[in-house]
Image: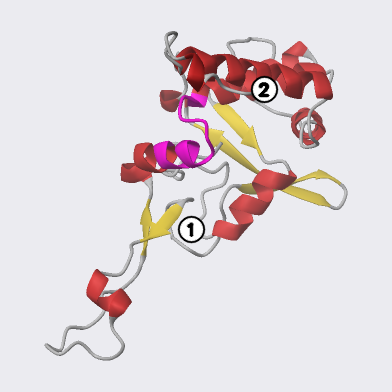
Amino acid sequence: MLFSWGRRPAKCLFESAVDLGTPLEIRPGLVRSVFIVPREYVKGRKREKIIVCNTTAQGIVDSQRGKHPEFVFTYVKDLPKWARLAKGPHPLGWTLPERSHKTLADRFEYAWGKTRTAAGMADLHLHDLRHTLGMRLRAAGVSDRTQNEILWHGSGSMTDHYAVAQLREIYNALKAIQAPGADGESLNLLAIMRERRQREVPQKSPSLRLVA
């Protein structure tokens, strides 16, 4: 996940005012963006970590190019009410404000809360996504070493210098989990969410019983 304050905590391997991430050829004909995160933004601050984009993440990064010179994820501030409803020039001569892209850094909590509520998962936390990712990596048969690198778990098995083969290994692992999970995984996740929802229903309200 690339957070909205992207450029500063997730600096590029190659400093550039244009590119989002370093485009590296993972294998012949396949170029993907790779980000390096300085250790001051990594838990424990022991060493830098990397983010390798799979096809889905690459598409998201590419869609953001050219919108802002510094930040990855931005938003366009809504027009004032009078401008949205106006059918012509404002009677007092007011002009429309410039609608530039702004960083989402100061709106992350709001946007995250609004999105998960709309999806019916108001109790979902960011760390839950890490657990789901770990589950899918294990189900795909990804090695513990590669899992640790993707999840940023403490491990001294990989050095700070990455060979292209290692980046390819990480990319292949992320590609393997792009397909929908196995039935067992989906059932497990649904069961967990159903259990959480049932706990929210008052015990003395049988009429409010949730139907699976």
Q: Residue at x 86, y 53 (%)?
A: 29
Residue 124 part of the magenta-drawn span: yes
Labels 2, 1: front one: 2
Q: Nearer the viewer, residue 101 or 13?
A: 101
- Range shown magenta: 113-126
| SS for callout 1 | loop
On the image, the x and y values in percent for residue 153 come to: 59, 14
| SS for callout 2 | helix
Q: Residues within 10 Å of mark 2 (few under 14, many from 20)?
A: few
Amino acid type, label 1: Ala
Q: Residues within 10 Å of mark 1 (few under 14, many from 20)?
A: few
Amino acid type, label 2: Leu
For residue 100, above or below residue 36: below
* Quadrant in the picture for the N terminus: top right
The residue pinned by badge 1 equals 17
Q: Nearer the viewer, residue 103 or 158?
A: 103
Q: Is residue 140 left or right of residue 110?
A: right
Q: Nearer the viewer, residue 193 or 177?
A: 193
Q: Residue at x 40, y 43 (%)?
A: 111
The residue pinned by badge 2 equals 190
